[in-house]
Amino acid sequence: MSELEAELRKAVRGEVGFDVTSRALTTMDASNYRRVPLGVVAPHDADDVAAVLEVCRDHMVPVVARGGGTSIAGQATGTGIVLDFTRHMNGLVSLDPDTRTAVVQPGLVLDRLQEAAAPHGLRFGPDPSTHSRCTLGGMIGNNSCGSHSVAWGTTADSVRELDVISGRGERLRLGQEWAGAPQGLREVVDGELARLRTGFPELPRRISGYALDALLPENGADVARSFCGSEGTLGIVTEAVVRLVEAPRARALAVLGYGDEGAAAEAAAGLLPFGPLTVEGMAADLVPSTELLPRGGAWLFVETGGEAEAEARARAEAIVRAADVVGSTVVTDPGGQRALWRIREDASGTATRMPDGSEAWPGWEDCAVPPQRLGAYLRDFRALLTAHGLRGTPYGHFGDGCIHVRIDFDLLTEPGVAAFRRFSEELAEVVVAHGGSLSGEHGDGQARAELLPKMYGHDMVRLFERAKGVWDPDDLLNPGMLVRPAPLDANLRFSVLPREPVDVAFGYPADGGDFSAAVRRCVGVAKCRTTSAAGPAVMCPSFRATGEEEHSTRGRARLLHEMLAGELVTDGWRSTEVRDALDLCLACKGCRSDCPVEVDMATYKAEFLHHHYEGRRRPAAHHSMGRLPQWLRLVARTRTAPLVNALAAVPPFAWAAKRLGGIAPERDIPRLAARTFSRWWERREKAPVGTGGDLVLLWPDTFTEHLSPSVGQAAVRVLEAAGLRVALPPTVRWRTPSGGGEGVTVAMDPVSLLRGRERVCCGLTYVSTGQLDRARAVLRRTLDLMEPVLGTAAPVVVLEPSCAAALRSDLPELLHDDPRARRLADRVLTFAEALERHAPDWTPPHVERPVVGQTHCHQHAVLGDAPDRRLREAAGLAGELSGGCCGLAGNFGFEKGHYEVSVACAEEQVLPAVRGAGEGAVVLADGFSCRTQLEQLAGVRGRHLAEVLAEGLEASG
């Protein structure tokens, strides 16, 4: 243990982490930069902060304050000690509705403050798109703004008082009329009054540099306001008194369509006299789907408020009438507004990929100009991009003249980095020529501080340095930011990654087969760090259960980044740090859809486990549950299911089996079906396969086959009632007859197909445990069996969502060298999709029951549930299913050591929904894991949608 670590552990009550994982998790924020800290401290209170500063001052070690780690300019990284305020100093101390103020700690997430203020009709004005995870301390440090700044200003406009500890350990209470100013600051200001009155551009989003003009006497000598935006370089905030504003009782959202972003930018300033709450802009390049948007190539999102819905709508419609648009829509429904705002908020992640999939990066993320000059600035900006051969799609706060953009810089090669520097220097001159600020929201950090002399001149920058010296004479706090900055092209996070592609098993088609590029997808916007899953979202259940960064998608991506870098994590694929972080990943695939840049941690986990255990002894659970299809097939062949069930019911035998299999002792072993689905199928009476409607192949997945054959039986009943011909996949290898599809259809007689020796399998259990060699072998055998089917038009209907997702996504990505894989993946349909596409005129039985339950996480992430929603509606099954993850997640919840997290995930949404269900509600759960979790934790029997519809058919006659 180092001397510094020992002294910190002795001095503070909070956690001190000098281990590899703690350091690796804080090497980066949401910027292009990377610095490796010595350690991380999570202070309990202000005394801990003061103690850390004292110890670090004695050792001359820098200190960096960190909130949610979503900063885009690099200011939340450092080489010394990082203070993590999110663990303990994250509380709402008080809220006074009468004075409309709140007292907050720096680690409080903005959404938690909004939730507390809402019952009083109040809110905190600024609301960055990262509102679900950014902290108040970080917002103060960056002087954050958000979409409502045209109405309520920046964070500085909302700060009343700040409790701060200076670099020398002085505890100060900052406020107006020089309250709390460190000794010497007033003298610096009094000697530079003329410069301070003339040296700052007048615009609503001027964030760059220190706000020393707030200390002018005509501005109230507001030390607290001046401190905002100082990026942790002047002092450490330990508590803040903030102003709340009255929230409109009703809101309307007008989305205005324009031909292009230039037209939208020119129009934005003209809407400000109408008093809107927001004027946000974005272009079509950033929108995955324009289904919810009016006609246009770019849009302004203009929100209005009122005492009632009619008043808010009237104001929105007045704006529409005054605007020269190609299309428009006005939405007053809160759900509809949220759906539209998600399109805008996700742009911060969506923008990191060009339409062709190539990478784009921040660096010039948020320049701001006077709103009236926005159109002209965008034209010059576009011209500069073209001159440098670069691409980027601007979006952001058009009403404030603030533009966000990610640009496809080449930050991997020396020539590319040199071009990045040249572009940055030239763009800074363009911004200044338009009377703008290099930063209009996210701060200067390392990305722009070097160029501040272009904006302010050298004399003003020297004045900034003098102010920093008053607050922090030892340059202890976040050195290299704002004054005496590090070069903007130093410490780039990509420089440490391998230049040659890493040898991997999956194909990573969206990343050119490059695992490093796949890991680089995580840009740190941290949508995975939300403390509640909004609506149908899933990501990231393990983080919500533990609250630990290493259990977030971002945290795991950071560890994988450091594994590839090899500086902190030095043992590559054998890393225990990466293994332990991935251990609580449920492989729910939620990040594949909910992450704005589609990080796919489930695939990365399978890849890592494949390499980590290559040639080594695997955990028992990988054998017992990873090879589940083999064990269940053996039981079926020997017809010993009754014996296995009987033994599992005897406590000593069950205890021994769970211990040997690495299964959580708290779990019950599921009962096996006495008769498999295939055996039931073989013996049932049915119409010949050659007559009737479209032919569909019903996939006998492992869970339906051996554990829930009633689901398969119900599906057959419904599909045939809909007029479809049902067959099971081949179980012997067929040679396709000459003459085409008709001969193939005859060869697929459903009885004769069962006389073979092999079974199709999606490989899910092998993939989830990282047994990728075995998974490939199983999937190639499956493709051999399915080859005659691939020559027909028959779709493949998969009842188990996780198996359907494995066939849709894992199969073509794992067997990327086999064209049959993509052909089979494209054939896979869910139960609802099959009915919608192949029996569009069929009317399901009218069940007329309320439903509760949960959309399977793999269905949400990979398959989509729109056809299921439509089918439920047609059947009279009313109600919404919850989001999140059930927590069992295949083998995850059964593995020893995962039980508590598994239960915590279930308790988030699905268990409360089921417990609160009304009389007669149907509990829907299409996944076997979901049904098992409900049965074992709530004593409730969940049912597949096919079972509910089959019962409806029986009831109707």
Image (cartoon, helix red, strand yellow):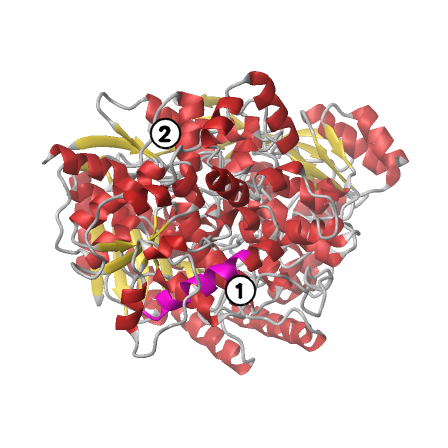
Give the extent of the magenta segment: 778-793
- Give the numbered dot on residue 606: none
Name the amino acid, label 1.
Leu
Which residue is rendered at x = 49% and y = 34% of the image? Answer: 888
Q: Quadrant of residue 296?
A: bottom left
Query: Badge 2: few (under 14), some or many (20 or more) residues near its Cα, within 10 Å?
Result: few
Q: In which quarter of the image is the N terminus?
A: top right
Total numbered circles: 2
- Give the numbered dot on residue 118: 2
Q: Nearer the viewer, residue 738 or 387?
A: 738
Query: Badge 1: few (under 14), some or many (20 or more) residues near its Cα, within 10 Å?
Result: many
* Residue where numbered disc 1 is placed: 815
Give residue 211's position: percent from left, percent from top: 59, 48
Give residue 472's position: percent from left, percent from top: 76, 42
Give residue 54's position: percent from left, percent from top: 81, 32
Asked if residue 314 is positioned above or below residue 661 in the image, the reply reads below
Q: Quadrant of the C terminus?
A: top left
Give residue 895's position: percent from left, percent from top: 59, 33
Helix, strand or loop at label 1? It is: loop
Name the amino acid, label 2.
Ala
